Image (spheres, rainbow, N blue to C red):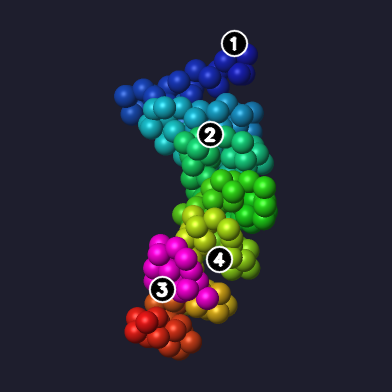
């Protein structure tokens, strides 16, 4: 049996109800590593949530070598698949930050920017290196991108102090969700400047 067929059979086993079979398939796929990446990325489009969850686990364990295939597919995938790809990139963490930052600057693909902002948001403190790009994202034309960016700063808390001026501007955003997330971020950051802005916002 050729390698592709072996990988396909192992991915099929990820949908098994038997925990032992699933666990064994997952371990074998992680051991195979890079050659399994294309089929695992494809498996993230599966309609079975269990398969997507298991494939995400495997790709996250493979880690950095999976990043190029994940980000390339996220740029063109249907929404459900793209969200799963973004979830996987967020699980890989800090090594995925540079490609997600680059995606945030794609002016022609609003959904791609949204998926990137969402992935960075899911990443939490691991997204620290994306802070300059996330500050810029607070001015993105997309409400969703601005909202995810603001909420990410809430997760970074005091380490996001540099974002306070941009978050204060976001308190006047046309989107209520963005305004609320900006206010929450300022509360979590907690600098004196942030507190003063929140007090003025609450009285407006």
Whether residue 100 appears in magenta in the rendering, the answer is: no
Choose between 70 and 115: the one closer to the eye.
115
Name the foreground residue: 117 vs 166.
Answer: 166
Depth check, mark 2 against mark 1: the one in front is: 2
Question: Looking at the image, is mark 4 or mark 2 earlier in the sequence?
Answer: 2
Q: Position of residue 52 (x, y in %)?
A: 44, 33
Cα–Cα gap, marks 3 and 2? 32 Å
Seen from the viewer's position, the closer of residues 86 and 149 is 149
Which residue does the image show at 55% across and 79% down from the upper left? 165
Mark 3 and mark 1: span between their CA atoms?
Answer: 57 Å
For the residues labelled 4 and 1, the Cα–Cα distance comes to 51 Å
Please tell me which of labels 3 and 1 falls first in the chain.
1
Residue 132 image position (x, y, % from top left) = 63, 68
- Few, some or many residues within 10 Å of mark 2 (<14, 14–19, 20+): few
Check contact, mark 4 vs mark 2: CB within 8 A.
Answer: no
Q: Which residue is mark 3?
A: 183
Q: Along the line of sight, which residue is nearer the eye, 141 or 113?
A: 141
Please give the residue where the numbered disc 1 appears in the rendered image.
1
Q: Earlier in the sequence, mark 2 or mark 1?
A: 1
Residue at figure coordinates x 50%, y 78% from the top left: 168
Q: Position of residue 1 (x, y in %)?
A: 59, 10
Which residue in the protein does label 4 denote?
A: 138
User: Considering the numbered disc 1 on the image, is that residue within a helix, a strand or a loop?
Assistant: loop
Closer mark to the observer between disc 4 and disc 1: 4
Where are the magenta residues, as a range? 169-184
Question: In the figure, 139 relative to 91: above or below?
Answer: below
Q: Circle 2 sits on which residue? A: 78
**Distance (Cα) linking label 2 and label 1:** 32 Å
Helix or strand or loop: what does disc 4 sit on? Answer: loop
Q: Is residue 202 above or below residue 174?
A: below
Q: Position of residue 50 (x, y in %)?
A: 38, 31
Q: Secondary structure at mark 2?
A: loop
């Amino acid at each position: 049996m050729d390698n592709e067929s072996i990988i396909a059979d192992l991915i099929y086993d990820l949908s098994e109800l038997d925990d032992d079979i699933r666990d064994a398939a997952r371990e074998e796929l992680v051991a195979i590593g890079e050659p399994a990446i294309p089929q695992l990325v494809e498996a993230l489009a599966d309609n079975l949530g269990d398969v997507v969850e298991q494939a995400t686990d495997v790709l996250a364990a493979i880690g950095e070598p999976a990043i190029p295939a994940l980000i390339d597919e996220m740029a063109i995938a249907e929404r459900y698949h793209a969200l799963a790809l973004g979830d996987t990139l967020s699980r890989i963490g800090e090594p995925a930050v540079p490609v997600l930052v680059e995606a945030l600057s794609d002016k022609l693909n609003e959904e791609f920017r949204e998926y990137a902002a969402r992935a960075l948001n899911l990443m939490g403190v691991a997204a620290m290196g994306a802070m300059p790009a996330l500050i810029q994202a607070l001015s993105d034309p997309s409400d969703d991108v601005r909202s995810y960016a603001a909420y990410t700063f809430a997760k970074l808390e005091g380490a996001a102090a540099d974002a306070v001026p941009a978050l204060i501007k976001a308190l006047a955003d046309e989107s209520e969700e963005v305004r609320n997330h900006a206010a929450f971020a300022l509360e979590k950051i907690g600098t004196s400047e942030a507190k003063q802005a929140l007090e003025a916002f609450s009285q407006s």
